Image (spheres, rainbow, N blue to C red):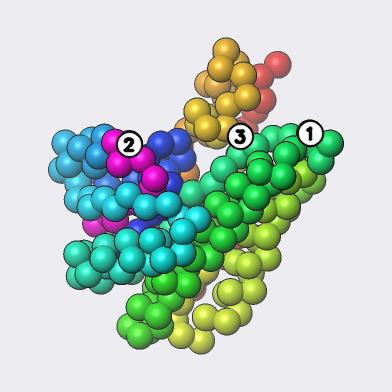
Amino acid sequence: MKVLLTGASKGIGEGIATFLGRSGHQLGLLARSEDGLRRVQENIHGEGGKAEIAPCDLRDHDGTASAIESMIQKMEGVDALINNAGLVIRKSAFEISLDEWHAMVETNINGLFYATRTVLPFLKEQGRGHIINISSISGHMPLSGGSGYAATKYAVTGFSDSLFLEVRGHGIKVTTIFPGSVDSQSHRHDPNEETDWKVRPEEVGEVCHQILSTRQTNLISHLEIRPLRKPS
């Protein structure tokens, strides 16, 4: 399967790319960091997988559209898009700055929309495809001390659920994944905290693989993955 993945240079995105690469998917990896993308690409190639890369800033509509269209041409098609790129700033409404608010909205909402909007015509034309949006448990549960982040993830959930109703008639699936605590550098608030109890990024990749493996006639619309236990 030919899969585009945003935010693929680190954290959850790297974990998704690693697992999907091992599972035989042909990957198109997008993120702002070219160095990070090349590192992930080399690791995938080292394990026998296939991956192309395209550095881009998802907050830039024209740049995002150009990068995705070029990637689809290079891969000779696209079967799925995984919108993973996201920015986590965990501050309350008293603390968060306007720049921080706008940065999360532009990345977590606008970037996801730009990527989706670019891919949809290709999926519609072929009459099939799959869009997986990585939300968060904070996308359907309140998050005290992180209201801005929660707001963007609630938006991802609402967009995904409504998008499904708009595209299902074209054979396009939409799935929302709600990760809980993931052992990702970008989500760590304390660099010294114990993380063995958390979900591993590769396990989110395993979930994506399972979702993409469903028959064309059915859909996993929502999936939540979280740790079994928290540390005592």
Q: Can you tell which of label 1 and label 2 is closer to the viewer?
A: 1
191 sits left or right of 36 in the view: right
Instruction: In the displayed orientation, state which residue is furthest to the right.
Output: 94
Q: Residue at x 26, y 50 (%)?
A: 53
Q: Can you tell which of label 3 and label 1 is closer to the viewer?
A: 1
Task: Pick whichever of labels 1 and 2 is earlier in the sequence.
Answer: 2
Residue 172, position in %: x, y?
A: 46, 77
Task: Pick whichever of labels 3 and 2 is earlier in the sequence.
Answer: 2
- Which mark, by number, is residue 36? 2
Q: CA distance from mark 3 to mark 1?
A: 23 Å
Q: Can you tell which of label 3 and label 2 is closer to the viewer?
A: 2
Q: CA distance from mark 1 to mark 2?
A: 30 Å
Residue 10, position in %: x, y?
A: 41, 36
Image vertical order of residue 134 relative to residue 182, above or below: below
Identity, as a three-letter code, of the amino acid under mark 2: Gly
Q: Which residue is mark 1?
A: 95
- Residues rendered magenta in the picture: 24-37
Q: Residue at x 44, y 81 (%)?
A: 171
Q: CA distance from mark 3 to mark 2?
A: 23 Å
Identity, as a three-letter code, of the amino acid under mark 1: Glu
Residue 33, position in %: x, y?
A: 36, 40
Q: Residue at x 52, y 80 (%)?
A: 167
Q: Residue at x 32, y 49 (%)?
A: 55
Image vertical order of residue 112 relative to residue 185, above or below: below
Image vertical order of residue 188 relative to residue 161, above or below: above
- In the picture, the quarter occupied by the N terminus is bottom left
Q: Which residue is mark 3?
A: 181
The reply to whether residue 40 is in sight is no
Residue 95 part of the magenta segment: no
